Amino acid sequence: MLTLLLGMMILDANLRLSGFFAMAGGWVMRRAHRPLALLAAVAATAGVFSAFLVNDAVCLVLAPLVAELTLTLQRNPVPYLLVAAMASNIGSTATITGNPQNMMIGSFSHIPYVNFAAALAPVALFGLLLTVVLIALLHRREFASGAQLTAPSTPIRFHRVLMWRALAGTALVAALFFAGQPPAKVAIIVGGLLLLTRRVRSERVYAQIDWSLLLMFAGLFIIVAGAKHGLLSGEVVAASGRLHSIALPVLAALTAILSNLVSNVPAVVVLRPFIDSLRDPAQAWLTVAMASTLAGNLTVLGSIANLIVVQRAAASGVVIGFWDYCRVGVPLTLLTLAIGTLWL
């Protein structure tokens, strides 16, 4: 799992340094000529990118871009920034590489990349549509007028050769994932190949990698291994296996609550010994992946992506309050969790 996360971070870093995220996001959003179309464009950009790349990295680039564009257009930036954060979380539900907890679940469960995407991509797609509708309803004043938007053509700096190399690496990684190749091996090999260039110094790529997150995962694995051997007796694990008779909604609710109490990655780690002992662990892991990710939309503290958007917005002079987030996040989380559970 650490290998997969490191490889994806290298890929993300190359795309970010090349200017791809800023150029692609700006191109999409400048072609939205109505407020509702702009909202949908932000949701689609955040959701699609986050489905294949780590959602936190997407929000790092997208949040200041959305804030700058909406302020320039003299629109209320809050709903557009909310959709960037929430769509990023929801879009990352679709695949193993969407977020760190999904990577961890993919490593634990050995569910093929294609099977994972086939099970959860429909949930992500419906969730993105619901996010746009809910934000539009709760911010009716912003979207009722149907004003014509004319975005300024702002030049964006990008490195053409580095961008094409990064895009080729991304396409190769995606193709090999769907072809059934081991995700960790694919990600680290392609990431290593991207480092073989004189066009960007390796130190700049390494500076983009969240080493503290990798270290945290390593520590979590050690803690869980110790807890499994020291605290979980054979009788306890066997007894948990008999809990498969509880409905998946209960597992989804438990995962969502735990994810908001201790964060989603530790929640997945805590649940692992119990999930592995169930009669159908693959279905249970898909439920945990869905619930732990969608639960991140409950409050502004639910995921790192939310905090990134709020912090980047504040740097642009836009304040997103706790209630501003929760009035959308709470109903959205409850609705998407119900939809995801029914689908699974």
Image (tube, rainbow, N blue to C red):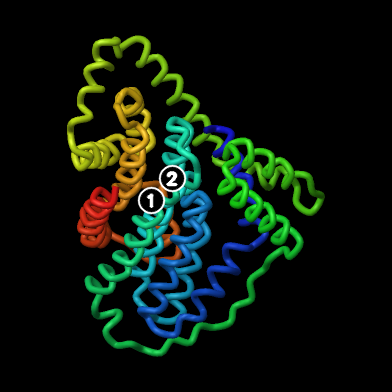
Is residue 92 shown to the viewer in this render? Answer: yes
Residue assigned mark 1: 120
Task: Say which mark, if any, is on residue 34.
Answer: none
Dot label at residue 116: 2
Secondary element type, mark 2 = helix
On screen, 6 above or below 330?
A: above
Q: Provide residue 315's location: percent of width, then percent of height.
A: 45, 61
- Residue 123 spot, x, y in % from top left: 34, 55
Residue at image x 38%, y 65%? 81
Q: Residues within 10 Å of mark 2 (few under 14, many from 20)?
A: many
Amino acid marked by disc 2: Phe
Residues under labels 1 and 2: Cα distance?
6 Å
Tag 1: residue type? Leu
Residue at 52%, 33% in the rendered image: 1
Task: Locate residue 21, reporting x and y percent.
Answer: 57, 62
Q: Is residue 55 above or below residue 252?
A: below
Left/right of residue 178 with respect to residue 118 in the rendered view? right
Q: Residue 224's quadrant in the figure?
A: top left
Quick check: 99 left or right of 197?
left
Whether residue 63 is visible, yes or no, is no
Label pair 1/2, CB-CB below 8 angstroms: yes
- Residue ranking furthest to the right: 198
